[in-house]
Image (cartoon, rainbow, N blue to C red):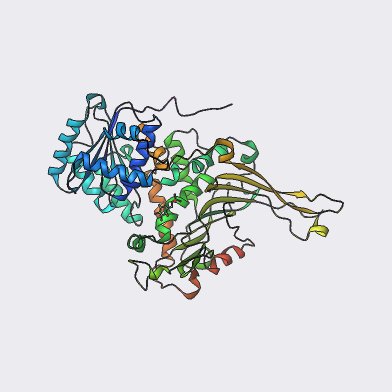
Amino acid sequence: MICRLDTARRRIEPCTLVILGASGDLTARKLIPALYHLFRDRQMPAGFRVVGLARREKTDESWRAELREALGRFSRSQPVDEDVWRAFAANVFYCPGNLTEPSSYVRLESRLEAVSPPELRQNRLFYFAIPPSQFRAAAEQLHRAGLLVREGDPGWQRIVVEKPFGHDLASAQALNGDLTQFAHEQQIFRIDHYLGKETVQNILMFRFSNSVFEQVWKREMVDHVQITVSEKLGMGGRGAYYEEAGALRDMVQNHLLQVLALVAMEPPVSLEAEAVRDEKVKLLKSIRLPQAGDGARQVVRGQYLRGIVEGQPQPGYREEERVHPDSNVETYVALKLFIDNWRWSGVPFYVRTGKCLPLSASEVRVQLRPTPNVLFAAACGPRLDPNALTLRLQPDEGITLRFNGKIPGASVGVRPVRMHFSYDAEFGAYTPEAYERLLLDAIAGDATLFIRRDEVETAWQIADAVRAGWEGKPLQDEEFYAAGTWGPDAADKLLAQGGHRWRHPEPVK
Ligand code: BG6
């Protein structure tokens, strides 16, 4: 039986998408390709306009030409269908303006009036593809121009904001305070693009629609959990950003904690946005904060030195462009986290991410407790391989259950075998980008896959507690790792203390 949960309650109304920061990388790489694909797949509302606002002087025509060129480079489907593009581009307009100047918003307002047919009403999605330092000014100016909250108007106005949402708890609280001065929390859609990934969304479906797995999802059955998001690439020109961020802020505070929340949260009372987000917040709040002095027992950081990744030489982090030669910024983090609630008490959750690791892959590995090894110890040694379930989030998306089987033959031999589900084999190569789903949800006003105010703040509280352990301390020799390896040795020791070891993701075959 195929069961679709959301089609009935989604309302995709005609609307205008206003992109603030229209000249930036995000617009060209992600937003326009996503909108083009939604249009091609007939998922955009019946009527829509895209209006870009940025400083540079451009005409509608020259902006469209730029976007068409970028689509040729970044679209997930090639070649671009020219007829579809032309029909899409006829809805795309440009408005030059400065984010901090009130007159720009007056111009924006009249441009919106001029290009939007009446059926679009005042339904507007403002996409903040701008640095967080400009969020407040943009929200304030939109508010002043009467574009954000239109009393008595039947339409809707929403803001989508990109990460990083602050750089610690205090700055995230300040940003939330700023934004909610000018818009209601229900109007604010904070993006974490990991939530737009099919496989990440599938975590909840998988957990709560399969009794066979639902039964084992608890401390009595689970020995420990490993969440890995490894990346083989280095900075790729993002050194300046990364110097301010580091792996903890860039990946753990958002993507990894979101995955962890979905893996470990309690079943929500419904699939409504608030019900799901309530449970995620509850889970994040149950994570035991690393205390000062926990140091190596719970937290490992690292930074890559020069090395070889996939046969190619890779410079060390400190040698990257726009990185300080003595930088102490971490490019690797591994954490041992405990969730102090009834279900997970005592079960370690190991979480790691890093740049310049041997391969790019994201996965969740749930390792189950071993059986009493009384029958096979003589033949197979003191430990049998424990059962494990691996949710491969990307690439080579799938789910693998590893269990033991008898080696055929007259002797008693046991070895691990697998049952494997592959997305591609089952559903074909269906690969919408995360941004397609997220943009559509924001248009539909469905906030389930967006981060709520208390959620982002709780995640920062965790990240801040981790960072407090190393703040101001220069990296030590043992915290470096060669590019192309699986991180510093200390990360192995972190697991060894608990009798565990990392199971690295396998390369795509
Ligand atoms: C971004 C980070 O949020 O996620 C990047 O800023 C990282 O540093 C990227 O490379 C990873 O996303 P994905 O979808 O490629 O796993």
Asked whether residue 294 is in view, the answer is no
Q: Is residue 183 left or right of residue 214?
A: left
- State which region is magenta: 2-8
Total number of numbered discs in the rendering: 0
Q: Residue at x 18, y 36 (%)?
A: 146
Residue that protrudes farthest toward the left in the picture: 103
Q: Is residue 8 above or below residue 484?
A: above
Principal secondary structure, stretch drawn in magenta: loop
Q: Position of residue 488 (x, y in %)?
A: 52, 68
Q: Would residue 214 be seen by someone viewing this image from the given angle? A: yes
Q: Is residue 149 above or below residue 503?
A: above
Q: 49 and 447: which one is in front?
A: 49
Outermost residue on the right side: it is: 410
Membership of 92 in magenta stretch: no
- Which image quadrant for residue 206? top right
Height in image: 114 above or below 419? above
Q: Nearer the viewer, residue 109 or 184?
A: 109
Q: Residue at x 39, y 49 (%)?
A: 456
Q: Quadrant of residue 83?
A: top left
Residue 353 pos. (x, y %): 49, 58
Q: Quadrant of the N terminus?
A: top right
> Considering depth in this image, is 9 or 180 the residue closer to the camera?
9
